[in-house]
């Protein structure tokens, strides 16, 4: 018995697990997999799933290029459980485990279409240089009243007072207390799963909240964000409401982001390479920021992967529209918080809450890595309001996909097959969305053009 197998077996027994969720994150960042009785989990051999699940669209469809992306035999992939990604399922009726698995092809190689493997490849680039990224995500989401008809606009749910929010209540303690039962259960579920959640705040939108995670290992935190999104949805269902991570669910409220704070330390000493002992920004730090500036327009589809994502990336609604950076400047895309040398970091404010965390982390870390490798130089730090400058990123999913993988170094990092697959799946979603005629078009164009 391998060491990992023994660790998993002991953990299952310790928690008296009766059922195991075999999980794989798909292209969208949702959980795919199967349920397996615990007594069969370690005796049935390596579990398998069709590789096709990695390239389904958000609607469950397959793109026209599907058979160019996967084996024409509709082959299985082999799954291996990651003992570092085992958690209980606190909302399950029976003792249940959720275990994230790594995907391999039938040749024993990490599957190139797995988003978790994409992040692993980027982290391996850092490891080869003796470096370790440290990240701290901030995840925003809305609570909304149950919505059974998609033709109706979303509304905030009623809180314990019986009323819906109508004001902008950023950082309001009392506004959070309106949903105290939800918040307490969410924290209990997070603690049961050992999610490193930190502070909770009420954001600008009605019934919009933000959870900050403690900083740590990038793969671990991608797994945690993946798990947290499931957790929040389940907690909301328990309380008769919905939780949504759509980037822009409300027409008149701000969008929801997945801000990513990131620093870089030496793997052997833990020294932050972004600042010297006097707190001065290093050349590596400046090149890292330059990499973010240079590659974000090419990788914007990983931060904004859905048709709705680009409603958030618009002028004057608290989201970036260009690649400016600045110190302590929240209007810039890449904000450098004022801090001491050990905590010197940059916050990437582009990713939406709807982003696949594995791909969002991979994109931002790959951009910084390439910036350092190529010794790129950033612009001067921005002074004033960056939203008054020109738009420098795509405004639609289709436009963003046209830029994806346009440089050879990005194709090398992410793999030509993965980039082709991602673009094909998301282009299919865009075309499906584009066939829908909106109420705005019927209202303003029906009789006037």
Image (spheres, rainbow, N blue to C red):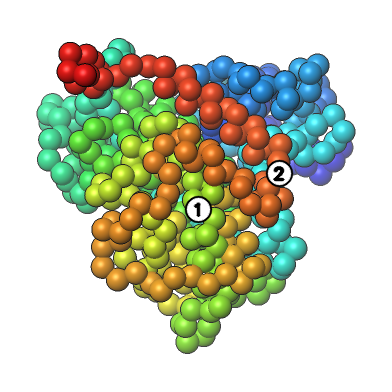
Mark toward the start of the polypeptide (2 vs 1): 1
Q: Is residue 326 above or below residue 228?
A: below
Query: Residue 58 location in percent, x, y?
Result: 51, 24
Please state the horizontal and vertical placement of residue 355, each as a whole percent of the image: 48, 39
Among all residues in the image, which is located at the extreme bottom? 278
Answer with the quarter of the image where residue 248 lies: top left
Q: Are marks 2 and 1 in contact (CB under 8 Å)?
A: no
Residue on which the image places disc 1? 296
Residue in the picture at 24% in, 32% down: 251
Residue 40's quadrant in the figure?
top right
Residue nearest the viewer, comparing 175 with 113: 113
Instruction: Tell me the number on the disc at residue 55.
Output: none
The count of marks equals 2
Foreground pick, 63 / 249:
63
Q: Position of residue 421 (x, y in %)?
A: 65, 32
Residue positioned most to the front: 449
| Residue 315 visible (yes or no) | yes
Kindly identify the residue that appears in the image at 47 percent across and 19 percent down. Answer: 432
Closest to the observer: 219 or 441?
441
What residue did someone put label 2 on?
415
Residue under the point 71% across and 41% down: 416
Quick one: quadrant of the C terminus?
top left
Q: Residue at x 71, y 50 (%)?
A: 412
Question: Taking the image as drawn, is residue 343 in sight?
Answer: no
Could you give the CA–CA distance between mark 2 and mark 1, rounded to whole angstroms?
17 Å
């Amino acid at each position: 018995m391998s060491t990992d197998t023994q660790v998993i077996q002991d953990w299952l027994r310790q928690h008296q697990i009766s059922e195991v969720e075999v999980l794989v994150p798909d292209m969208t960042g949702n959980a795919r997999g199967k349920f397996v009785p615990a007594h069969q989990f370690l005796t049935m051999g390596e579990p398998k799933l069709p590789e096709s699940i990695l390239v389904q669209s958000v609607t469950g469809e397959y793109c026209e290029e599907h058979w160019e992306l996967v084996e024409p035999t509709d082959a299985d992939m082999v799954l291996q459980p990651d003992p570092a990604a085992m958690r209980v399922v606190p909302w399950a009726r029976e003792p249940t485990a959720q275990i994230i698995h790594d995907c391999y092809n039938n040749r024993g190689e990490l599957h190139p279409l797995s988003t978790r493997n994409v992040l692993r490849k980027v982290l391996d680039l850092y490891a080869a240089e003796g470096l370790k990224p440290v990240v701290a995500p901030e995840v925003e989401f809305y609570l909304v009243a149950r919505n059974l008809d998609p033709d109706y606009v979303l509304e905030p749910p009623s809180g314990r007072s019986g009323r819906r929010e109508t004001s902008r209540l950023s950082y309001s303690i009392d506004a959070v207390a309106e949903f105290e039962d939800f918040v307490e259960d969410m924290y209990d579920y997070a603690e049961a799963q050992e999610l490193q959640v930190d502070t909770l705040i009420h954001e600008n939108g009605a019934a919009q909240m933000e959870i900050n995670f403690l900083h740590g290992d990038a793969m671990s935190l991608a797994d945690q964000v993946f798990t947290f999104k499931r957790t929040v949805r389940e907690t909301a269902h328990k309380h008769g409401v919905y939780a949504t991570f759509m980037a822009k669910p409300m027409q008149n409220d701000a969008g929801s982001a997945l801000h990513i704070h990131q620093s870089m330390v030496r793997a052997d000493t833990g020294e932050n390479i972004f600042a010297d002992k006097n707190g001065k920004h290093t050349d590596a730090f400046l090149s890292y920021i330059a990499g973010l500036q240079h590659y974000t327009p090419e990788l914007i589809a990983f931060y904004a992967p859905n048709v709705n994502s680009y409603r958030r990336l618009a002028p004057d609604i608290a989201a970036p529209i260009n690649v400016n950076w600045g110190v302590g400047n929240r209007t810039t895309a890449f904000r450098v918080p004022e801090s001491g040398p050990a905590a010197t970091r940059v916050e990437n404010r582009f990713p939406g809450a709807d982003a696949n965390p594995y791909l969002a982390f991979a994109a931002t870390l790959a951009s910084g890595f390439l910036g350092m490798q190529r010794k790129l130089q950033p612009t001067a730090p921005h002074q004033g309001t960056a939203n008054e400058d020109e738009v420098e990123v795509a405004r639609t999913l289709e436009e963003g996909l046209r830029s994806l993988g346009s440089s050879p170094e990005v194709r090398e990092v992410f793999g030509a097959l993965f980039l082709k697959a991602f673009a094909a799946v998301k282009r299919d979603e865009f075309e499906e969305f584009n066939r829908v005629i909106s109420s705005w078009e019927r209202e303003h164009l029906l009789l006037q053009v």
